[in-house]
Amino acid sequence: MALIVQKYGGSSVADAEKIKNVARRIAATKEKGNQVVVVVSAMGDTTDDLIKLAYQISSQPDARELDALVSTGELVSSTLLAMALEAIGCEAISLSGAQAGIRTDNAYRQARIVKVDSKRVAKELKAGNVVIVAGFQGITKDMDVTTLGRGASDLSAVALAGSLGAKVCERYTDVAGIYTADPRIVPDAIPLAEISYEEMLELATYGSKAVQPRAIELAELLGVPIRVASSFLNSPGTLIHGGESMEIRNKVRSIAHDLDVAKITVVGVPDRPGIAAALFEPLAKANISVDTIVQNTSINNITDLTFTVAKSQLEKAMTVVEPIAKSIGARECLSDSKLGKVSVIGTGMQNTPGYAARMFRVLSDKRINIQLISTSEIRITCIIEESQVVDAVRALHRAFELDTE
Ligand code: ASP
Ligand code: MG
């Protein structure tokens, strides 16, 4: 008998039929003799709809009230799923994040889990129940409801799996696993049997929406393997883990892309200590997350500073940066909101020369201009024009032979 944590995303519980389908899968897992804890997201687009509703009421909804409001999405899906299980003769109980012992700090909308007290969950498992936990939410020590950031039901699931010592955290959505590229744009992309935590973290951060990045970090920290699979199919999906059995380590694993990139260039910046801090501290304070940053070598003590942000944050970032640029004597601020990112990812690239050159050659042959480049030990990212991203992903997928197993 194993203890398994399963997590079902919003698309898997989007309507009554889908909830019944999920219930049948859970019941089948239990019938095999497993103990099952299930974490659910809110049905379909419920979270977005609730946030929209709040903003129709107030342009600045109170963060505490907003968290209490959006947390109801997961209460709806978890209670319905428990009913669906009972209806097919499988004993189940739903628990809110608070009841499941997910304790957090009080940073509303982005709360951090400080502790998981899984006593109640363990007690319900012992009593023979499937335990359905509302994802995405926790409770402060003052008993206020918090949420853990968008997409954070994944994080709830991993935290519970770690605390309960589960064998695996199975994560189900409408995609069959992690692919060598997004199968919607590369039809011959292949699902990967396995991927390492570090590769998955790069992939999730650089475009793939498959698993929330914080959940991957926590899974690595706690040593919880995550299996990503479809709730509509019976394929094994992809195992994200840290094990030694990783096949073909000298290969690129996947091509990631992201169409949500905007760029700001501060032109003619005096090159002296403190300038970068003067620019980026206010951006951080305004909660704008800055991605790739490039500073040119200065000529006559004058340089250019370029960085990228999400498109939705461009306007806000410009209102922060423009007055600062003026005050530090920069010449002007330029922006471009029609950019995208394409990344080549794989632990096999570590300490192996030639991957960057190959990537640049492929883009050059396609007449794609590279605007910015950033790298980690296992990733090379090029920022290019948005309209060329699909072409670039397809060409790279072919060039790195990801279409052949
Ligand atoms: N329902 C929440 C969201 O949409 C949490 C999740 O889906 O994981 O962000
Ligand atoms: Mg959701």
Image (spheres, rainbow, N blue to C red):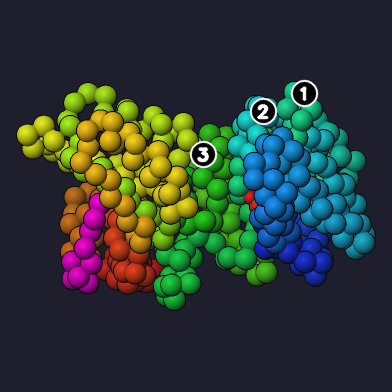
Q: Is residue 377 left or right of residue 4?
A: left
Label 3 vs 2, first from the N-terminus = 2
From mark 3 to mark 2, how far is it between C-alphas? 21 Å
**Circle 1: element type:** loop
**Disc marking residue 217:** 3
Q: Name the kind of residue labelled 1 in the image.
A: Asp
Q: Is residue 245 above or below residue 120?
A: below
Label 1 vs 3, first from the N-terminus = 1
Marks 2 and 1: in contact by CB < 8 Å? yes
Regarding residue 199, the answer to whether it shows in the image is: no
Residue sitting at x 23%, y 67% = 368
Q: Name the kind of residue labelled 2 in the image.
A: Asn
The image quarter containing residue 297 is: top left
Front residue of 12/251: it is 12
Front residue of 9/85: it is 9
Measured from the top left, where is residue 309 in percent x and y? 39, 47
Quadrant holding the C terminus: bottom left
Region rendered in magenta? 364-372
**Circle 3: element type:** helix
Magenta span includes 368: yes
From mark 1 to mark 3, how far is it between C-alphas? 27 Å
Q: Which residue is mark 1?
A: 142
Q: Which residue is mark 2?
A: 106
Instruction: Look at the magenta stretch and give its main secondary structure.
Output: loop
Q: Is residue 388 above or below residue 166?
A: below
From mark 1 to mark 2, how far is it between C-alphas? 9 Å
Regarding residue 29, the answer to whether it shows in the image is: yes
Classify mark 1: residues with Cα within 10 Å, few (<14), some (14-19) or many (20+).
few
Front residue of 125/82: it is 82
Residue sitting at x 28%, y 55% = 382
Could you tell me how many numbered marks the image carries? 3
